[in-house]
Each structure stands twice: as structure tokens, then as C-alpha cells.
Image (spheres, rainbow, N blue to C red):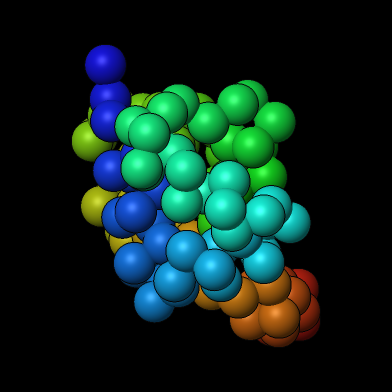
Amino acid sequence: MKDILASIVKYRQARGWSEYQLAEEAGLPQSTISSWYRKNMMPSLQSLEKVCSAFGISLSQLFAREGEAMDLTQEQRYLLERWAGLSPEQREALMKLIETM
């Protein structure tokens, strides 16, 4: 089974977010997130959905093992990894740019 807490840390660190910033972005109390690690608890499905929404990823992406989620080309994978690291404002700007092309 994949270590979901380690995956959350990976996504959080990729954005340069603290636990507090993740809590803010996900709309969760910071104490909830820190308790997952202190008590080695699995987050609830509702909490995972909020965390995934904050990261801009799906639950399946969070649970997927490396290279298991989809059959993507290297170029597609590169673009999706970069997309996941963008802020909501950056995503909106990029979508507007793409729509004008």
C-alpha cells in the first residue's frame, strides 16, 4: 500500500508549502494535518478530497504508484507535473493563454 502521508508531504514540499499553508489552501484546520503525522493516521476521504483539490490533483493521482496512474508520454507527464505546481491564479492565466492560441 502506498504511503499517502509521504505523498502529501511530497506534493506540499514541491509547492514550498508548510503544513499551515496546506491547511489554508485545503480549508482544513492545521491541527488536523499535523495530527495525521503525530498519530500516523490515515486522513478521512473528505480530508483527502480537500487536500487533492488544494494540490490540483485527483484522488487517483494521489493514490497511484509511480508510473501507474496513466499511460502518458514523457512530455505529457512533464506538463502535468508542472501544472500541479501552479497556483490557481497561474492555472487560470495559463488556461486563458491556451484558449487564445
Residue shown at 45% from the left, 73% from the top: 17
* Residue 90 figure quarter: bottom right
Between 30 and 47, the one nearer to me in the picture:
30
Query: Where is 41 relative to 90, above or below?
Result: above
> 57 left or right of 14?
right
Q: Nearer the viewer, residue 99 or 68?
A: 68
Residue 79 showing in the rendered view: no
Q: Quadrant of the N terminus?
A: top left
Rendering coords of residue 59 (x, y %): 55, 32
Q: Residue at x 59, y 58 (%)?
A: 30
User: Is any part of residue 88 visible from this angle?
Assistant: yes
In this picture, residue 96 sits left or right of residue 67: right
* Residue 3 drawn at (x, y percent): 28, 30
Image quadrant where one finds the C terminus:
bottom right
User: In the image, is residue 93 above or below residue 31?
Assistant: below
Instruction: Residue at 63% x, 25% y: name it.
Output: 45
Q: Residue furthest top?
A: 1
User: Toward the viewer: 38 or 53?
Assistant: 38
The mark total stands at: 0
x and y percentages locating residue 31 in the rendered image = 57, 53
Residue drawn at point x = 28 percent, y = 25 percent: 2
